Amino acid sequence: MRLLITAFSDRLVPNRLLGASVEREREREREVIRLSLVGKMDKMNQAFEKVKILVGMEVEDELPAEDETSFAFLDDFNRNCTLSTKQRLHGFAICLVAGLTCTLLSFLVFFNPIKFGITFTFGNLLSLGSTAFLIGPKRQVTMMVDPVHNKVLTLLAIMLEFGALIWYSLSYIPFARSMVSKVVVACFDTEF
């Protein structure tokens, strides 16, 4: 028992001597953890502010510009645009319906290339511009030229093009299209 107490007290003696340095080390660790948490909270607040802007809520403090070469005209337009959520939804719906209507009506004048080109282009621009009511014109343009979105859309376009190539190639094999159609329907049929 005496040996156990001696061994225990030998360990306590250096800790008592090093108590101040251990306490300083613990204080440094606490400070590092606190600064880490503060940094994470700042990032979370910035993300929350971006979400607020994305859904059209008002933000108290304006976020710092992410891109110094941004569109000055669109920045001014976004600052001066004070539409309510209901007005944004109405603008979106009206532009989308008008754009789809113009696009569908353009097929009535399909054989007149000038009229078709004008109405089809105008309909597509209206449909594309309708989302600017929801997220704002600056964010719309920024997201359209974002390389991440371009990569995803490019990958999707490649997959669609490859599928179209396979389907076109199957047209040269007798009954291949009908056979592939029946196999796909049989694979995805939920009725047993």
Image (cartoon, rainbow, N blue to C red):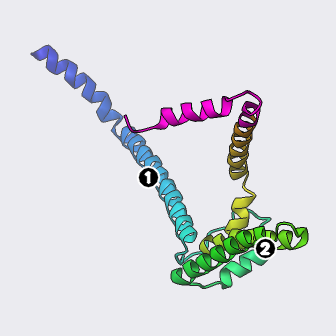
Identify which amino acid the numbered label 1 is placed on: Arg
Q: Which residues are magenta?
A: 166-192
Q: Which image quarter holds the N terminus?
A: top left
Give the image quarter of residue 61: bottom right
**Mark 1 lies on residue:** 34
Disc marking residue 122? 2
Q: Relative to the observer, which residue lies in front, 68 or 137?
A: 137
User: In the rendered structure, which amino acid carries the disc numbered 2?
Assistant: Phe
**At 75% from the left edge and 58% from the top edge, which residue is drawn?**
145
**Residue shown at the point (33%, 38%) measured from the top left:** 19
Frontmost of labels 2 and 1 is: 2
For label 1, count other residues whose C-alpha is less than 10 Å away and answer few (under 14), some (14-19) or many (20+).
Answer: few
Q: CA distance from mark 2 to mark 1?
A: 55 Å
Vertical relation: 64 (above or below) 145: below
Given residues 19 and 94, the one toward you in this image is: 94
Q: Specify which label sits upstream in the sequence, 2 or 1.
A: 1
Indicate the position of residue 82 as horizontal and vertical percent values.
60, 85
In the picture, the disc for residue 15 is: none
Percent x, y of residue 28: 45, 45
For label 2, the SS is: helix
Number of callouts: 2
Callout 1: SS: helix
